[in-house]
Amino acid sequence: MSTNHNCALLVVDDEPYILTTLSALLAPDFEVYTADCGETAQKIFQQHRIDLILTDQKMPRMSGVQLLEWVRENYPQTIRLLMTGFAELEDAVEAINRGKVYRYLFKPWRVDELIQVLREACQRFKLERQNEELLDQLRRAKQELEHRVQERTVRLEEANHELQQKNLMLEKLALTDPLTGLPNRRAIDRLADAEIRRRMRYPSSLALGLVDADHFKEINRQYLLPGGDQVLMDLAKVLIASIRTVDTVGRIGGEEFMVVAPETNVEGAVALAERIRSAIESFAFSYKDAPIQVTASVGFAVADLGVTTEYDQLKHQAAAALGEAKATGRNRCIIYSAPAAAS
């Protein structure tokens, strides 16, 4: 499905003023439908494709929880959100258990919080649909290959090769950060651990670095999730351009990235860390033509030739170095050298 269309949002509330207010408020971002009761909402579902539903809990005849449970059973792809008062906390818990709601909002809601939650729900809906489409494509490809293998045994080797490629694609998806395209935490952990084992057989130096965008919460607060995502995507590009071809960078969570640099001693780590820090500071980050000043703190841990270390130890030292870089002013590099094992 296209990621450019506005999500179709159904707002359900028995108070006409709330429906009018929310419809006007949300129209710029969503294709808004309204219903004043659960029964009307059910009819709208039968007539239109609804991506998100935001319903009040306290309504006559059919409660919000009952409506969301019906939606879950009949339209499970729809993202479900519940509005409830503080006095209705038990209803919110029931909604989670029965309606499997994505989020619940307490009344009275804040406009900015409501819009942000709905935008995030819309983004989740689109990502889930994209993932389902991709999995369907992979399943169809696998079925097609299996059929060709059965009917054309002479092409068995070729068909098996194609099937392996599809499986490799699926594995790559499981090891890739969807936002930046970089290896995710699982993938970079595997690679770093493999480098640790490799240097046990072929002694060499190894540097492990952590890069953390400074004051990223403030960037998210000012530019919201889309602006923060743009910064992370650009930051990934800067990191890729700053490392060597033998190095690897991955996103391990939030605004934090990990760099694995084989054959890198303390001097090399110092140069690499400063190159990364300087490149980030000088890059022209922006969102919707508005410039964003971004800096990063960098912490590296180095296991020089002859130094025995485990991956967790080296990562802990890199985290400590990053912590010191942030604690002493940010936008700086700290390098730790792992001590040699006692003989």
Image (spheres, rainbow, N blue to C red):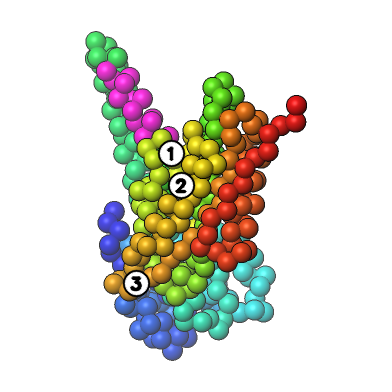
Does residue 45 sit above or below 200 in this rendering? below
Residue 167 is inside the magenta segment: yes
Q: Position of residue 162 (x, y in %)?
A: 30, 25
Q: Secondary structure at mark 1?
A: loop
- Label 3, residues with CA under 10 Å away: few <14, some 14-19, many ≥20: few
Mark 3 or mark 1, which has the lower sequence index? 1
Give the side of residue 157 with respect to residue 181, left or right: left
Q: Is residue 45 above or below residue 239?
A: below
Q: CA distance from mark 1 to mark 2?
A: 10 Å
Secondary structure, mark 2, is helix
Residue at 31% x, 21% y is 161
x, y percent for residue 337:
62, 42
Please tell me how crowded label 1 is: few (under 14), some (14-19), or many (20+) other residues with Cα within 10 Å.
Answer: some
Do labels 3 and 1 touch, CB within 8 Å?
A: no
Quadrant in the picture for the C terminus = top right
Of the residues shown, which amino acid type is indicated by label 3? Pro
Residues drawn in magenta: 158-171
Answer yes or no: do the residues labelled 1 and 2 have beta carbons within 8 Å?
A: yes
Residue highlighted by disc 1: 247
Name the residue rendered at 44%, 75% in the picture: 222
Q: Which residue in the protein does label 3 denote?
A: 291
Helix, strand or loop for disc 3: strand
